[in-house]
Amino acid sequence: MKKEDLSILFERTLACDYDDDGAWEAVNALRSQGGREVFGRAAQWLKSARPLERARAADILGQIGVGPGRAHESPTEACELLIELLLGEQHPRAAASALVALGHIQDSRALPVIYRFIGNEDPVLRHAVAFALGCFVQDTASHPGLMLLMSDSDEDVRDWATFSLGVWGDLDSARVRDALARRLDDSFENVRLEAIAGLAKRHDARVLPLLIEALEWPEAQDDPEPKLIEAACALLSLSKEPRGWVGEDYARALRQRFRGEIAPSWQ
């Protein structure tokens, strides 16, 4: 790609606001292009006085070179640069982008700097921490942070942390299960659903009453919530959804399978 074309792509990443589709298309094009020139320009932007340029640099470096059959081309170098940025970064948008980027890279050296932001007053930053820690969910060092964020005041932060620990992650322990069980009565439905799915994945019987009740709702007969079906299939050890089943079919199968593990009033 010509230098002029690269320059145009870099400038397009700054168009409109941070979530602009066109800007993200340019970010993805630069990630896909990769190479030392793209890496070098992004590294220079990390030192920019403009927060958006620092944020875009982090967005690019977090997944540079990544694509079908292609891994991150310079994970160690990118990780070191992003850690250096975060040690002094004050702007929430730039810091959030760097945290997400470190999550994508998954270098455990980043965990201490990720944890530095876990109590930040900005929910956007705490959500970025939840995402980053979720990328390390197979490492138990991420679990204390995820468990803390599962009770965050922001529902989206709770949602991502609960999804990460319960569904994205595979590790099982009493602490993990108890943390998920505490979210079964969360005020945000998405959090409750992630907790249900996470406990069902671990075949924890505490999820049965709530799951069966939800599967018997009228709404679950016409258009059942996918997370509920996912949970039921996990508990029933079904590799795929039985054709034609609706919520009450799953509920009936659960009652039969777990008859001795459900309180009498629920059988």
Image (cartoon, rainbow, N blue to C red):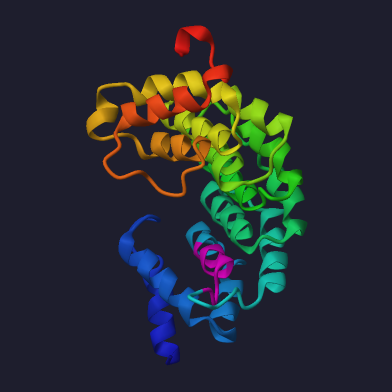
Name the residue: 72% across, 29% down. 174
Q: Nearer the viewer, residue 214 or 139?
A: 214
Query: Is residue 1 covered in magenta?
Result: no
Name the residue: 72% across, 35% down. 173
Answer with left or right where residue 151 lies relative to residue 218: right
Q: Where is residue 205 in the image (x, y as percent from the top left)?
A: 58, 24
Name the residue: 35% across, 43% down. 242
Q: Quadrant of residue 106?
A: bottom right
Q: Which residue lies furthest to the bottom in this view?
A: 2
Classify the position of the N terminus by image quarter. bottom left
Q: How many circles with numbers are drawn on the protein?
A: 0
Q: Quadrant of residue 161?
A: top right
Rendered position, 206 above or below 143: above
Q: Position of residue 3 (x, y in %)?
A: 45, 90
Rendered position, 122 above or below 61: above
Q: Where does the magenta region start and end?
A: 56-66
